[in-house]
Amino acid sequence: VIPPPVIHIESYTEDSISFSLKMATNIKVTGYVVNIYWTFDTHRQEKRTLIIEGEKSIQKVANLTAHTPYEISAWAKTELGDSPLSFVHVVTSGTRPASPSLKAKAINQTAVECSWTGPRNVVYGIFYATSFLELYRSPHNTTTTSHNITVLVQRDEQYLFLV
């Protein structure tokens, strides 16, 4: 039986998490697959996947958001097959940034000007869809470091926007 890997949180800050991976077995490990999940504004779950080669590993994931819960899941790739999943949860330190205040204004039938308030020197994600279900499951999206963007949409549709 292949055991799940041990994920140990080494440290965390307001914008990063460092963790180690190891296996409590003599089975040769060839690598790990790690997923980091977080929920954006309760509407959209985000994920980052890391493919890690080798047996033991310490990883640092950066560009995270302060005071945000993250779930890290991992499984090991071994000479006998894949291990079961292992999970840990961690909340980054600091104060979570205030939610931006979004304004969306139709320019014409196929373009919407989105503008918002918020801190400088960060990356903003703009998500949009024609229904709440689509906004949650598979929205259109783009990113920018500015405080406004023009989004092209289909004519004769109503859209929901989230930044």
Image (spheres, rainbow, N blue to C red):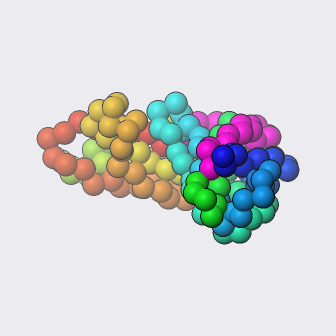
Start and end of the magenta stretch? 83-100
Q: Is residue 73 visible?
A: no
Q: Is residue 157 visible?
A: yes
Query: Magenta region's main secondary structure?
Result: loop
Kindly identify the residue that appears in the image at 80 percent across and 40 percent down.
93
Q: Position of residue 112 (x, y in %)?
A: 30, 48
95 inside magenta stretch: yes
Q: Position of residue 18 (x, y in %)?
A: 79, 54
Kindly identify the residue that appears in the image at 41 percent across and 45 percent down.
127
Kindly identify the residue that appears in the image at 47 percent across and 33 percent down.
43
68 inside magenta stretch: no
* Residue positioned most to the left: 156
Question: Which quarter of the picture shows residue 79?
Answer: bottom right
Q: Position of residue 148 (x, y in %)?
A: 45, 53
Question: Which quarter of the picture shows residue 132?
Answer: top left
Kindly identify the residue that appears in the image at 19 percent across and 39 percent down.
157
Nearer the observer, 43 or 153: 43
